Amino acid sequence: MLVKVFGSAVFGVEATTITIEVNIDKGIGYHLVGLPDNAIKESSYRIAAALKNNGYALPGKKITINMAPADLRKEGSAYDLTLAIGILVASGQIQAEESANFIIMGELSLDGSLQPIRGALSIAIKAKEEGFKGFFLPKQNVKEAAIVEGLAVFGVENVQEVIDFFEGKGSLEPTTIDMQTEFHKALDFPEHDFSDVKGQESIKRCMEIAAAGGHNIILIGPPGSGKTMLAKRLPSILPPMTMRESLETTKIHSVAGKLKEVGLMNQRPFRSPHHTISNVALVGGGSYPQPGEISMAHNGVLFLDELPEFKREVLEVMRQPLEDREVTISRAKFTVTYPSSFMLVASMNPSPSGFFNDPNSPSTSSPNEMQRYLSKISGPLLDRIDIHIEVTPVPFEKLSDTRKSESSVAIRERVTQARAIQSKRFEAIASVNYNAQMSTKLIREFCALDDVSLQLLKTAMERLNLSARAYDRILKVSRTIADLECSEKLQSNHIAEAIQYRSLDREGWLG
């Protein structure tokens, strides 16, 4: 008997429906075709044990299973439940005429219980697009899949629950989630708040500008000056996520298997990989490509602490994603693309000893050591960072001050207002949402300078020997400063402030 059941494969962040044809005939054997990997080939052992422990059996006949399209590589153990139901229906052990109307996915344990899968949200979205009635999946993944409206999503704990549903015996009900309620579950009081930061008013100003325009930023200062503390508080002043951003981010984390029974992500991600990270772990890839840290930080913040300690080749692979806001991973037979629109926040000591330019702790590093240390960061990478700012240690008077600083909520209101101005400005341009994303053409259109501002910028370019990319960065940051002041035109004071935020371009830093 031949039956068809349906599963799904995830490539990048998008799902593709997989038709699983199960044919049982005379003879003996178990034949699985359609480019399955080893985890799928081993499924026969898990399925046999799970069925036996639930009162069923793997037929002692010739079982032929085709996973179509046959030229598409399938991987992972998430097809166990799909194959098991197909075998039970084809062998006549259960009656499930409705099984072809559902996507069925889940990894089986030997007792028939189900383990979580990856990419449940992408699979649910595809199932709805293709008109399936519902989606069976492990209970641990049900919250993320139930986000999709108009699709019956059933979270199950055991293969027996699926069997009982198709035979009309169980009382399994679809899980429903109010998407709007889930989306608007926000933290009124962020875990990390700028009100806890003593002093550092100029740095807070930089962080506000960076958040308002989506600008990449690097903090340069000695150990203990508060660089990491400030970076951790940046997500608390970013504008609330839109529904589109929330869905995009949730899909990526779902594909990576990082949601852990969480439904819709409504908080911007903050990723802080260790400096020993590899190229593949940072940008994504592997034999079966998975999203890397830069994609996990999509619509949020990627924090690279102690930037010069990262391997130079690891940092260099970020250059293109920083420009294109996506990363493409190519293999011999397929290519996947992951979105990677993130804010880069980096920190570094100004010298190997950490105390260069600190009047209270003279640097013990020689000029050659300084050059080797700073040369670990390439000029092209620094050119892609809009704001360079020095962080100095907080004096005792500030540390002992018991007064609360301005809260993240108050700063976020100004940031959100500036982002609203930018959204209106770029509403007719699909690929641009905020100032940091402006192309050279848009910079010329929206960052027009008067004669005074133009002369000021020309002088700075000549004295600091800035590149053309740095010129564009200064104009982008100036535009954001003007937006925070609700100014339609760029003024010379906006340009002057933006020029100050190019510390690493000054003579004495990079030679």
Image (cartoon, helix red, strand yellow):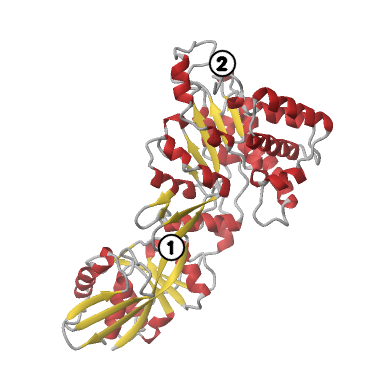
- Which of the pair 338/507 is nearer the observer? 507
Residue 306 in sight here = no
The three-letter code of the residue at mark 2 reads Pro
Judged left or right of residue 49, residue 226 is right
- Which of the pair 43/161 is nearer the observer? 43
Q: Where is residue 301 in the image (x, y as percent from the top left)?
A: 53, 42
Residue under the image location 57 percent in, 57 percent down? 183
Residue under the image location 79 percent in, 30 percent down? 453
Please state, as top left, top right, bottom left or bottom right, where the C terminus lies in the image.
Answer: top right
Q: Where is residue 123 in the image (x, y as percent from the top left)?
A: 45, 67
Judged left or right of residue 408, residue 114 is left
Residue 395 shows which numbered tag?
A: 2
Figure check: 9 above or below 131: above
Badge 1 element = strand
Q: Where is residue 450 in the image (x, y as percent from the top left)?
A: 83, 34
Which image quarter: residue 87?
bottom left
- Which of the pair 351/130 is nearer the observer? 351
Which image quarter: residue 429?
bottom right
Residue 464 shows which numbered tag?
A: none
The three-letter code of the residue at mark 1 reads Phe
Q: Position of residue 254 (x, y in %)?
A: 44, 58
User: Do labels 1 and 2 touch, CB within 8 Å?
Assistant: no
First in sequence, mark 1 or 2: give its number.
1
Determine the residue located farthest toward the right in the rendered image.
451
Label 1, label 2: how many angstroms apart (C-alpha)?
52 Å
Pointer 1 residue: 11
Residue under the image location 49 percent in, 43 percent down? 318
Please state, as top left, top right, bottom left or bottom right, where the N terminus lies in the image.
Answer: bottom left
Figure check: 431 above or below 9: above
Question: What is the crowding at mark 2: few (fewer than 14 residues within 10 Å), some, or many (at least 20)?
Answer: few
Residue 472 in sight here = yes
Question: What is the crowding at mark 1: few (fewer than 14 residues within 10 Å), some, or many (at least 20)?
Answer: many
